[in-house]
Image (cartoon, rainbow, N blue to C red):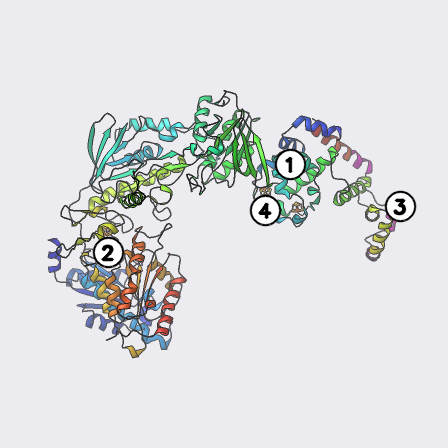
Amino acid sequence: MSNLNTGMVEKYRNNFLNEVEANVEEGEWVKMCMQCGVCSGSCPLGPYWDHPPQELFMMIRAGKREEVLESTSMWMCTSCYNCLVRCPRELPITHIMHGLAHYATRLGIEPKGQPTRQFAQLFWDNLAKNGRVNELWLGVNLYFMNGFVNGIKVAMGMAGIGLGMYKSGRLSIKELIGGHTVKDKSGFKAMIKKAQELESARVDK
Amino acid sequence: MADEKKIAVEKKIGAYICNGCGIGERLDSSQLETTAKRDGKAAICQQHDFLCSEAGVKMIQDDIDNEGVNRVVIAACSRRAKTEAFAFKDVVVIRSNLREGVIWVRPDEDDQRETTQEMADDYIRMGCAEAKYANIPSASGQQSVNKNILIAGGGISGMTAALEASKAGYPCTIVEKSSALGGATAQLYKKIPTRAPYADPEDTGVDAMIAAVEADSNITVFLNSTLTNTAGAPGRFTADISTESGSTETKEFGAIVQASGFTPYDANNLPEFAYGKNKDVVTQMELEALAKTANGGAIKRPSDGKEVSSVLFIQCAGQRSTKAGHLEHCSGYCCSASIKEAMYFKDQNTAIDTTVLYTDLRTPGAGGENFYRSGQNKGVIFTKGIASEVVDGANPTVKFKDLILDEDVSMEVDLVVLATGMVANAGQPTRAEITLSENEAKEAGTEYKVSVESILNLDYRQGKDVPHMTNGFADSHFICFPYETQRTGIYTAGPTRRPMDTRQAMDDATGAAMKAISEAENAGLGKAAHPRVADLSFPSFRQEGCTQCKRCTVECPFGAINETEDGYPEFNESRCRRCGTCMGACPVRVISFENYSIDTVGQQLKAVDIPDEFDEKPRILVLACENDAYPALDMAAQNRLEYSAFTRIIPVRCLGSVSLSWITDSMNSGYDGVILMGCPSGDDYQCHFVKGSAMAQERMSKVGDTLETLSLEKERVQTYEISITDIQKVPQLINEMAETIEKIGMSPFKF
Ligand code: SF4
Ligand code: SF4
Ligand code: SF4
């Protein structure tokens, strides 16, 4: 358990809802869920979740801290916003899902080896580097996520598509070496740093 | 006698045929005129292009004024249309329905012209026949207006009714059993909010209301008092008001509001929740007392006076359950009450854990959802689950099944609150019900005692209180006529009628007060109450013919008929709703109204032309309840839904008024099928006269025998329950009958 996590357990003891309200983005909405189940029924990936959104909200209220934060569930959210537009109580469900995932990551108790989580990390690392997504490296990293041999196999399989993208100018081989960046890269880095500082200040308080 | 004099006046029928609304194009009006004069014996018959226009109405009025026409037959639209235009005074007005009853339900095709015209001719004959046998009703003249309103119960409902009626200028008398006004509301710390934004508990306002009642010189209050005898009828009730000390005062009233409230369900019936065993398991009402004591400070629990830091509310405790000793109904207010009580804690200290354990959270009323949301906002936790047990201990432990997470949970809290429901103070069961229970007890060799006290102590043959409906609440039809009970002039309000909160009770009481006022006025004029409002006719019976069978007395849904000492029925006309159930019940047909009798219907069905068996033109008689089935038929016509041209429809006041003689007469005179259409009966009845359609169902179950003696197929008579919305269904049922007749053949009874 990370230090932060032990600290949080101590701080809130049984009151996980309060912890979520204080630390998770849009967490103060969790108490407003009326358990209608519309979100769970609307989610295109719903059947694949261990605990669909409605259930997660109830678990938070029931104080099931580890079960929620260590769950793979919120990592399944694809940000389609179906639930959010349908929730009769107007909960920002999508944002809460990401908030929970992010909070679990901060505490260091997120599920390891969960593919969508891994992809999210790859995507972020890729983006945070130059302020632009490097499609080529993102693809390469993704293919080799599960080892070299598997990576070759996937890459071979995707070769046709890659070639097509290259021909139509959607993919540049130059991306392999450096690639394109935002104009003010240091400004961008400073911005991200500040945002991270602000967030830590909020969580650690 | 007055009515004999009326019969002596010569009846002069004027028939008026409208050619508007397409009637003129579709029908041969000169043929109709001939029919009216020749068969209907109309002294005068005139046509008009727009009968409902000023000129058309004037034409009729002139004949009334100058030609002595006193029976007006309007052959135009349905009796439900243009009622204001055709409201002629001091004459009998009969409507022959040529528009909704004929041209709108038949296709405009050449080969249909003949049967359509026959339909119209028959309706003219029927209208004239009814006109001949109907008389102009007038009040018996025995009435006088009594503006005094009696209110049983001095809680929030009773006080509201008194204040409202008093404001309208009607003196009120409140009879309250306890030693103070205020009822259950006075025991509350705060009430469920009644105003936007519906976010916080509200002051009950009961003290101000008591002060207003006490300051009102138009309101007399009797405390520590009960009604020991209530006799008479609307407009002339006499009530004995007896105080605890033994003195009795008799006063007279025009109408009564019964606001006798509720008794909280006895939580001792819930040993599984450790009630009575663990002091920290309380009911919602008991929590109100704790909150009152705390008065905004920390609420302390009963066992050891510890400040409560966690509380759990068990919803539906002993309610919505079919277990013996539990209440089957939802009391409707307890979810909101628990939210309110959880707020007592949260508003004082947000750190207090408050959990509401519910299966379905029901917060009726405009602000209900807002209040629920506000509770969530304040941090009240709502958990969907079913409590199975409360384990006794220093702190009670609630065992429940979480229905969302599907797991069994134990939760230890400082205080458990049970949301138990309301038991209506609706008085005693009816005499018939008591007799039934007595008989059962006798069979079992035990003695039966009525355990509940009567509220009104009515001196009615049918029982001491208003009849009950489901779950012991006073009967009322909550959709169509909420305040009406089965005792005319007695209106129930508040939780004695159905479970409700204070706000609803106040609205309810206002409505009941208005009803009581209008009934006091109507009864004074000899006019009927709902649904035949302002009808002046009332049933009378021919004593020489009466066999004292008592069927009318028993079957009258409103307890209107008492018995004289020598065993004859005694009609209390102002208790009567004019349904005619007594008339339908009377086996020797001696009961009648001036404008509705065995003859007014019987002669109509005989006036219909019955073609010869070989004409292949059957006749289907439809007796349709005027409250729902007839409007449904009208609406079917408005939608141009077609039904058989062989149909002849007669509206009846209630299926309960249908005399078996009409059925036998129609069979004997060659009708091929008879359809009865009444309102749904049973627990969810829609009969405007409560029991009328149920009575009819029972009587019609015996029609089979009659048909058998005539060697007729039993399919020829059908009874259907029709709601006003059954617009598609009514023509279908008629057409099914036409098909049936085609299958089984024509009636052999045609002459
Ligand atoms: S749709 Fe909204 S209110 Fe309904 S269960 Fe989901 S989050 Fe709760
Ligand atoms: S936004 Fe996320 S949680 Fe909501 S429906 Fe889409 S995938 Fe499911
Ligand atoms: S049965 Fe109907 S019409 Fe007859 S006395 Fe009773 S209420 Fe009046």
**Going from the N terminus, do you reach mark 4 or mark 3 first?**
4
Q: CA distance from mark 4 to mark 1?
A: 19 Å
- List the residue tagged with mark 1: A26
Label 2 resides on the chain identified as: B
SS label for mark 4:
helix
- List the residue tagged with mark 2: B585
- List the residue tagged with mark 3: A177
Graded by Cα atoms within 10 Å as few (under 14), some (14 to 19) or many (20 or more), the crowding at tag 1 reads many
Looking at the rendering, the stretch of residues picked out in magenta corresponds to A162-191
Badge 3 and badge 2 both on one subunit: no
Q: Cβ of disc 2 within 8 Å of ligand 3?
A: yes
Decide: marks 1, 3 in contact (CB < 8 A)?
A: no
Label 4 resides on the chain identified as: A
The spot of residue A178 in percent (x, y) is: 87, 44
Q: Cβ of disc 4 within 8 Å of ligand 1?
A: yes
**Going from the N terminus, do you reach mark 4 or mark 1 first?**
1
Q: CA distance from mark 1 to mark 2?
A: 70 Å
- List the residue tagged with mark 4: A38
SS label for mark 2:
helix
Quadrant of residue A163 in the image? bottom right
Label 1 resides on the chain identified as: A
